[in-house]
Amino acid sequence: SEAVSKENVQDFQSEKMILRRRQLRHITKSIVDLYMPAFVTLTSNMIEEDLLLQEMILQRTLLEYESMAKLVNCTPVCIWRRSGELLFVSNEFSSLTGFTRKEILNNNRFIVEFLDHQSVVEYYDLFHQFLAFGSKESQKNATSNGEAVFSKCKLLVNSGSFLKCTCCWSVKRDSFNISLLVMGHFLPIFDED
Protein backbone atom coordinates (compact mmCIF):
# COMPACT_ATOMS: atom_id res chain seq x y z
CA SER A 1 0.00 0.00 0.00
CA GLU A 2 2.82 2.40 0.88
CA ALA A 3 4.69 1.47 -2.33
CA VAL A 4 1.57 2.17 -4.39
CA SER A 5 1.12 5.51 -2.65
CA LYS A 6 4.76 6.49 -3.33
CA GLU A 7 4.34 5.45 -6.96
CA ASN A 8 1.18 7.59 -7.30
CA VAL A 9 2.99 10.58 -5.82
CA GLN A 10 5.91 10.08 -8.20
CA ASP A 11 3.53 9.75 -11.18
CA PHE A 12 1.76 12.95 -10.14
CA GLN A 13 5.06 14.82 -9.76
CA SER A 14 6.25 13.50 -13.10
CA GLU A 15 3.03 14.65 -14.81
CA LYS A 16 3.40 18.05 -13.16
CA MET A 17 6.97 18.39 -14.45
CA ILE A 18 5.88 17.42 -17.97
CA LEU A 19 3.12 20.06 -17.82
CA ARG A 20 5.58 22.73 -16.57
CA ARG A 21 8.00 21.90 -19.39
CA ARG A 22 5.19 22.19 -21.96
CA GLN A 23 4.16 25.53 -20.48
CA LEU A 24 7.75 26.77 -20.54
CA ARG A 25 8.17 25.66 -24.17
CA HIS A 26 4.91 27.41 -25.05
CA ILE A 27 6.06 30.67 -23.43
CA THR A 28 9.46 30.45 -25.13
CA LYS A 29 7.84 29.79 -28.51
CA SER A 30 5.49 32.71 -27.95
CA ILE A 31 8.41 35.05 -27.18
CA VAL A 32 10.47 33.83 -30.13
CA ASP A 33 7.65 33.73 -32.70
CA LEU A 34 5.42 36.64 -31.70
CA TYR A 35 7.49 39.16 -29.76
CA MET A 36 11.14 39.05 -30.74
CA PRO A 37 10.84 39.55 -34.53
CA ALA A 38 8.75 42.70 -34.15
CA PHE A 39 10.76 43.99 -31.18
CA VAL A 40 14.09 43.51 -32.97
CA THR A 41 12.73 45.14 -36.13
CA LEU A 42 11.43 48.16 -34.23
CA THR A 43 14.47 48.64 -32.00
CA SER A 44 17.36 47.76 -34.33
CA ASN A 45 17.69 51.33 -35.62
CA MET A 46 17.41 53.02 -32.23
CA ILE A 47 20.25 55.19 -31.07
CA GLU A 48 21.27 55.95 -27.50
CA GLU A 49 19.09 59.07 -27.42
CA ASP A 50 16.04 56.98 -28.37
CA LEU A 51 16.68 54.64 -25.46
CA LEU A 52 17.13 57.56 -23.07
CA LEU A 53 13.89 59.10 -24.33
CA GLN A 54 12.10 55.80 -23.78
CA GLU A 55 13.33 55.64 -20.20
CA MET A 56 12.30 59.27 -19.56
CA ILE A 57 8.83 58.57 -20.98
CA LEU A 58 8.61 55.46 -18.83
CA GLN A 59 9.57 57.32 -15.65
CA ARG A 60 7.16 60.21 -16.38
CA THR A 61 4.32 57.81 -17.17
CA LEU A 62 5.07 55.84 -14.03
CA LEU A 63 4.66 59.03 -11.98
CA GLU A 64 1.34 59.76 -13.69
CA TYR A 65 0.08 56.21 -13.19
CA GLU A 66 1.15 56.22 -9.53
CA SER A 67 -0.75 59.48 -8.98
CA MET A 68 -3.82 58.06 -10.71
CA ALA A 69 -3.65 54.84 -8.67
CA LYS A 70 -3.45 56.87 -5.47
CA LEU A 71 -6.44 59.02 -6.47
CA VAL A 72 -8.57 56.04 -7.46
CA ASN A 73 -7.61 54.00 -4.45
CA CYS A 74 -10.22 51.27 -4.45
CA THR A 75 -8.76 48.84 -6.99
CA PRO A 76 -5.67 46.68 -6.40
CA VAL A 77 -3.13 47.92 -8.96
CA CYS A 78 0.43 47.10 -9.86
CA ILE A 79 2.60 48.51 -12.63
CA TRP A 80 5.49 46.76 -14.35
CA ARG A 81 7.93 47.21 -17.23
CA ARG A 82 7.45 45.24 -20.44
CA SER A 83 10.09 42.90 -18.99
CA GLY A 84 7.69 42.16 -16.11
CA GLU A 85 9.76 43.93 -13.42
CA LEU A 86 7.37 45.41 -10.86
CA LEU A 87 7.72 49.17 -10.34
CA PHE A 88 4.65 50.10 -8.29
CA VAL A 89 2.02 48.37 -6.17
CA SER A 90 -0.94 50.09 -4.59
CA ASN A 91 -1.89 49.70 -0.95
CA GLU A 92 -4.94 47.75 -2.13
CA PHE A 93 -2.72 45.29 -4.04
CA SER A 94 -0.68 44.78 -0.88
CA SER A 95 -3.88 44.24 1.12
CA LEU A 96 -5.21 41.76 -1.44
CA THR A 97 -2.03 39.69 -1.64
CA GLY A 98 -0.76 40.12 1.91
CA PHE A 99 2.71 41.12 0.67
CA THR A 100 4.11 44.47 1.77
CA ARG A 101 5.21 47.04 -0.80
CA LYS A 102 8.73 46.70 0.59
CA GLU A 103 8.73 42.90 0.07
CA ILE A 104 7.67 43.38 -3.53
CA LEU A 105 9.57 46.46 -4.68
CA ASN A 106 12.86 46.16 -2.79
CA ASN A 107 13.63 42.72 -4.21
CA ASN A 108 13.29 43.31 -7.98
CA ARG A 109 10.25 41.05 -8.25
CA PHE A 110 8.45 40.25 -11.50
CA ILE A 111 4.72 40.00 -12.16
CA VAL A 112 5.05 36.34 -13.18
CA GLU A 113 6.17 35.54 -9.62
CA PHE A 114 2.67 36.47 -8.46
CA LEU A 115 0.73 34.37 -10.98
CA ASP A 116 0.13 30.63 -11.08
CA HIS A 117 1.74 28.68 -13.92
CA GLN A 118 -1.32 28.65 -16.21
CA SER A 119 -1.89 32.37 -15.65
CA VAL A 120 1.73 33.05 -16.68
CA VAL A 121 1.17 31.16 -19.94
CA GLU A 122 -2.05 33.08 -20.60
CA TYR A 123 -0.41 36.40 -19.69
CA TYR A 124 2.40 35.89 -22.21
CA ASP A 125 -0.07 34.84 -24.90
CA LEU A 126 -2.23 37.91 -24.29
CA PHE A 127 0.74 40.24 -23.96
CA HIS A 128 2.29 39.10 -27.23
CA GLN A 129 -0.99 39.03 -29.15
CA PHE A 130 -2.53 42.26 -27.89
CA LEU A 131 -0.40 44.45 -25.69
CA ALA A 132 3.18 44.34 -26.94
CA PHE A 133 2.42 46.03 -30.26
CA GLY A 134 -1.33 46.63 -30.22
CA SER A 135 -2.75 43.74 -32.26
CA LYS A 136 -6.52 43.70 -32.44
CA GLU A 137 -7.08 40.01 -33.18
CA SER A 138 -9.80 38.23 -31.23
CA GLN A 139 -8.94 35.76 -28.49
CA LYS A 140 -11.08 33.40 -26.44
CA ASN A 141 -11.25 34.09 -22.70
CA ALA A 142 -10.20 37.72 -23.20
CA THR A 143 -11.54 41.03 -24.44
CA SER A 144 -9.11 43.49 -25.99
CA ASN A 145 -9.01 46.76 -27.89
CA GLY A 146 -5.23 46.70 -28.43
CA GLU A 147 -4.59 48.98 -25.45
CA ALA A 148 -6.11 46.84 -22.71
CA VAL A 149 -6.99 43.20 -22.13
CA PHE A 150 -9.62 41.88 -19.75
CA SER A 151 -9.08 38.33 -18.58
CA LYS A 152 -8.82 36.09 -15.52
CA CYS A 153 -5.80 34.95 -13.55
CA LYS A 154 -4.79 33.38 -10.27
CA LEU A 155 -2.82 35.75 -8.05
CA LEU A 156 -0.39 34.56 -5.38
CA VAL A 157 -1.26 35.56 -1.83
CA ASN A 158 1.11 35.61 1.14
CA SER A 159 -0.20 32.28 2.48
CA GLY A 160 1.20 30.54 -0.62
CA SER A 161 -2.22 29.87 -2.15
CA PHE A 162 -3.71 31.52 -5.23
CA LEU A 163 -6.72 33.82 -5.44
CA LYS A 164 -8.89 33.74 -8.55
CA CYS A 165 -9.14 37.27 -9.99
CA THR A 166 -10.48 39.10 -12.95
CA CYS A 167 -7.85 41.42 -14.33
CA CYS A 168 -7.39 44.27 -16.72
CA TRP A 169 -3.95 44.83 -18.20
CA SER A 170 -3.41 48.13 -20.01
CA VAL A 171 -0.28 49.47 -21.67
CA LYS A 172 1.53 52.71 -22.29
CA ARG A 173 3.44 52.75 -25.57
CA ASP A 174 6.38 54.81 -26.76
CA SER A 175 6.64 56.65 -30.08
CA PHE A 176 7.77 53.38 -31.73
CA ASN A 177 4.48 51.68 -30.67
CA ILE A 178 6.36 49.43 -28.25
CA SER A 179 4.84 48.86 -24.83
CA LEU A 180 6.79 50.55 -22.04
CA LEU A 181 4.62 49.93 -19.01
CA VAL A 182 1.81 47.56 -18.17
CA MET A 183 -0.72 48.45 -15.49
CA GLY A 184 -2.66 45.58 -13.96
CA HIS A 185 -5.93 45.96 -12.08
CA PHE A 186 -7.03 42.90 -10.10
CA LEU A 187 -10.44 42.16 -8.59
CA PRO A 188 -10.97 38.94 -6.63
CA ILE A 189 -13.62 36.48 -7.82
CA PHE A 190 -15.38 34.83 -4.92
CA ASP A 191 -17.31 31.84 -6.22
CA GLU A 192 -17.87 28.31 -5.08
CA ASP A 193 -15.55 26.38 -7.43
Image: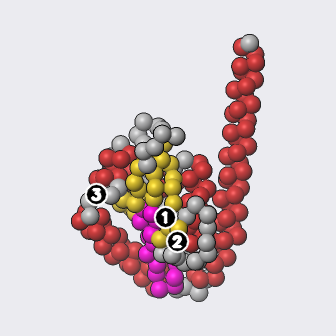
Q: Mark 1 falls on what kind of element?
A: strand
Q: Mark 3 falls on what kind of element?
A: loop
x then y, percent, for residue 81:
46, 66
Q: Is residue 87 left or right of residue 27?
A: left
Instruction: Calculate the distance from the C-alpha at mark 1 to the C-alpha at mark 2.
Output: 6 Å
Residue ID for mark 2? 144
Which residue appears farthest toward the left when viewing the image? 71
Q: Mark 2 falls on what kind of element?
A: strand
> Does 176 appear in magenta?
yes
The residue closer to the viewer here, 45 or 182, is 182
Q: In which quarter of the image is residue 41?
A: bottom right
What stretch of residues is rendered in magenta?
168-184
Q: Residue 150 has which mark?
A: 1
The residue closer to the viewer here, 162 or 166, is 166
Instruction: Calculate the distance from the C-alpha at mark 3 to the C-alpha at mark 2.
Output: 23 Å
Answer yes or no: is residue 82 visible. no
Measuring 53% from the left and 68% from the top, which residue is drawn there? 143
* Label 3 CA crowd tier, 10 Å (few <14, some 14–19, many 20+): few
